[in-house]
Image: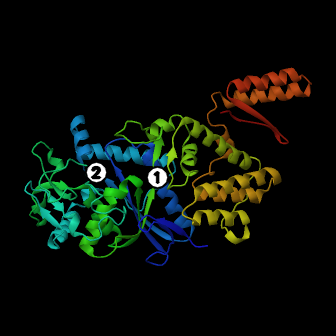
Amino acid sequence: MSLRIYNTLSRALTDFVPIEPGHVRMYVCGMTIYDLCHIGHARMMMAFDVVQRWLKASGYKVTYVRNITDIDDKIIKRSVERGITIRALTDEMIEAMRADIGLLGIEAPTLEPRATEYVPQMLTLIGQLEAKGLAYKSASGDVNYAVRKFAGYGKLSGKSLDELRAGERVAVQDGKDDPLDFVLWKTAKPSEPSDAKWDAADWGHAYGVGRPGWHIECSAMSCETLGETFDIHGGGADLQFPHHENEIAQSEGANEKPLARFWVHNGFVRVDNEKMSKSLGNFFTIREVLAKYDPETVRYFLLRTHYRSALNYSDVHLDDARNGLKRLYTALNLVEPAAMETLDWESHAMAARFKSAMDEDFGTPEAVAVLFDLATEVNRSKSSEMAGLLKKLGGFLGLLQANPSGFLKLGASVDEQSILERISQRAAAKTAKDFALADGIRKELLAQGIVLKDTPGGTTWEAAQ
């Protein structure tokens, strides 16, 4: 079975074949970096981490570009509030983002371009659009995109022009020919700091002093790093309109060729049936979540729901994720997994099931179900090979690579040496047939959050939930 991906543009599952044989070029809209990332941001980056991992597991070379928006109104406002430069703010937040998502096992992209490093390319693209009659300078000095002059506008969102409304992330300026038009180059305001302004004349353009609009950033960065047409463009479902629709209008309007062959969007994280977002104030930063839960539990929580589905966030769901992950690690703790340097998908029925699940639009829920079936088999057979397969398949999702015993002890609030001493005392009590004392030690440790497990090889312990 070949890989199939759901393409938002065609609204269908479609066989995936890259433009260049053996090489996948993927662009994902990353963070607007003015504050700490929340768990909804982690969900987006996790979704495409799994995509790039599976593409590599499938034998492809992957050039993965995930941009950073390091100039916009929110960034300017925050830097002024804190009394620091825009660069100081964004450098700080980028470092924090990388640290936080690194703990979750989200791998770094191949390239991570910053918008402020591509202003010349943005101006060139704006010039091309103006030359084709798709951009105009308004009375306010802004340069806007003329939406109704691009015949394909609305094809990604599936709405007609009359159904759509302008969707600016920044303050709407006067002087637009049409309410649907969006800004490509914003004229600078006297009140804005100097590091929020560029003089277009420095690159031979007569657009004055200002800064790029949000949408033009990604068109310039994606085309510069991956070419005018590439394989996959991804991002959160909230970017489908207007951001991605506007990217298509800009890039295809200028270059007259498709921007991306596949458009891939992940679903929202919800809290009490509302999308998690900073504007609603119902968000939890990655750091806040990691203060309560270990990183692999959070990763597993994000992966066990299909990337296109909405994901409900709560402590109850994270507790359940922790217990599920413990089941998998408990199986790996029974027997030393056999080394599996390579994997013949055809020779293992469960491996074939796992591959089939992932090949169907990166179906992590079904793939995780295979892991649990494997854990059941390891518990039954104590097979080193099955344990090795469980660990190998988990690795494709960035799971099950920790020491099983160490993972199972996470969260314990007492010293391990004291636990081992009490286990030894309990064993002596059992030998002396003092079962009341043995049972008392077990209950004492349970009250401290420690669960004892008697096995043929001796008594082990793990943290209770």
Label 2 secondary element: loop
Residue 144 placement, left or right of 253: left
Q: Is residue 86 above or below residue 258?
A: above
Residue 146 x/y as whole percent: 19, 64
What residue do we see at 77% from left, 47% from top?
Answer: 334
Give the numbered dot on residue 70. 2
Per the image, the residue denoted by label 1 is 267
Q: Tell which of 37 and 129 is nearer to you.
A: 129
Q: Tell which of 336 and 30 is nearer to you.
A: 30
Counting residues from the start of the chain, the first of labels 2 and 1 encountered is 2
Q: Residue furthest front?
A: 162
Q: Is residue 406 above or below residue 421?
A: below
Residue 245 placement, left or right of 354: left
Residue 251 x/y as whole percent: 28, 69
Give the numbered dot on residue 451. none
Mark 2 against mark 1, which lies toward the viewer?
1
**The N terminus sits in image quarter:** bottom right
